[in-house]
Amino acid sequence: MDDRGLLARNAMYVGGAIGPFGASVVVPMLPELRDSFSASSEQVAASLTAYFVPFAILLVVSGTIGERFGRRRVVRVSLVTYAAASLACALAPGLGLFLVARVAQGASNSFITPLLLAGLAEVHPPERLGRAVGVYGSFQAGGQVLAPVVGGLAAEVNWRLGFVLPAALALLLWFTPPPGEPRPGADRPPVAVLFHRRLLMLGLASLASGAGVIGIGYLVALYSRDVLGVSPAGTGLLLMAGGAAGVVASPFLGSLVDRLGGRRAGAIGAVVAGSLVVLMGQTARVALVTVLWAGVGASAGLIRISQQRLAVGLVPRNRGGAVSSVLSLRFAGHAVSPILWTSLVARDPGLDFLAVGLTAVVVVALFGAMGPVAAGRAEGEGSLSS
């Protein structure tokens, strides 16, 4: 690979950090936003919803649109839009315009994330794609870990500075878009893609894991504060252990996916994560909960990498559409997770964590329901026609 190709590949990895960073950077600056806009806590907290709702909804169609009109072109437009939206957040004079800009951020990222993943599949051979997705996952986790740090530091000076960094990064990435020219044949309705049995099973596994072991950071925070009596700062450090474990482990987990195959590796990750979640609910020792949460972070990373690796290979002529469909179901799982579990934690944390852990059984069953891969192919590669 020449220097330009290497630069483009590394830029795709870095691009994986944009979405998680942009989503979470507001969390530590909510009090400053409240004061700056003379708003209530509930009103400024809506900045998270304003980002995630359009992101999750547009993921249903964004990948297919990107394949239809060309990944290179669509990602470039999305990066410029994301940069403009980030600067609009920084310059917003009132809460209304700030929330509109957050909507634009989330909508733009819905096109960036799946198309960067699809682009990785074009520059890596199938037998090494798992590691590439793992490296991408480590940058995603890194963006999520760094966002509260950068947002907190910005809030100490001026919260508006926290939106300048993602804007600048998006503009730099404009120069190194992922490969992918327009594909008129990729305009198949994305809903129809979901009804392929194997991709449907993968999407449901993504939904179940998002509602279960992948999406319970809020539950761990509640357990830490309300049951274990940990301070806000201590809870932040506890939660960071899971993200840091994902950053460190993801490249190695990606190689494991290459060796074991996506279905097997994903099932192993689900079993390990589910078991650790159950154990978390049985201990009141903060140090042990932190270690267990780090293990959940790493094993949940294995689930995500397996799902993303399988998704980019199942529909080769519409990789972006397959990835965005699977990701949209994962975020739907994140959305329903608080409704499913939060009410139990005050009554019986052990029961709550047991229920979450048992969702791993569903994830394993759905990976199994995808069925074996044809001999001579990397798992998930070219398994469906588009």
Image (cartoon, rainbow, N blue to C red):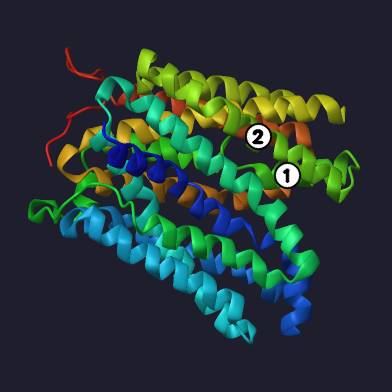
Amino acid type assigned to the residue bearing label 2 in the image:
Ala
26 or 52, which lies in front?
Answer: 26
- Of circles 1 and 2, the one toward us is 2
Label 1 and label 2: CA atoms lie apart by 28 Å
Q: Taking 21 as reference, is 326 above or below it?
A: above
Q: Position of residue 112 (x, y in %)?
A: 37, 55
Looking at the image, residue 315 sits to the left or right of residue 368; the answer is left
Q: In the picture provided, is 194 more to the left or to the right than 46?
A: left
Residue marked by disc 2: 244
Relative image position of residue 148 (x, y in whole percent): 69, 53
Indicate which disc, 1 or 2, sits on the residue closer to the N terminus: 2
Residue 169 in view in this figure: yes
For mark 2, does the 10 Å Cα neighbourhood hold few (<14), some (14 to 19), or many (20 or more) residues? Answer: some
Residue at point 51%, 23% (across, down): 269
Asked if one can make out residue 283 in the rendered structure from this viewpoint, the answer is: no
Q: Which residue is pictured at 8% across the width and 52% down the height?
A: 185
> Label 1 amino acid?
Leu
- Tell which residue pokes out farthest to the left in this image: 185
| Relative side of 92 to 74, left or right | right
- Helix, strand or loop at label 2? It is helix
Q: Secondary structure at mark 1?
A: helix
Compared across the picture, whether 98 is left or right of 196 comes to right
Q: Quadrant of the N terminus?
A: top left
Q: Which residue is mark 1?
A: 344
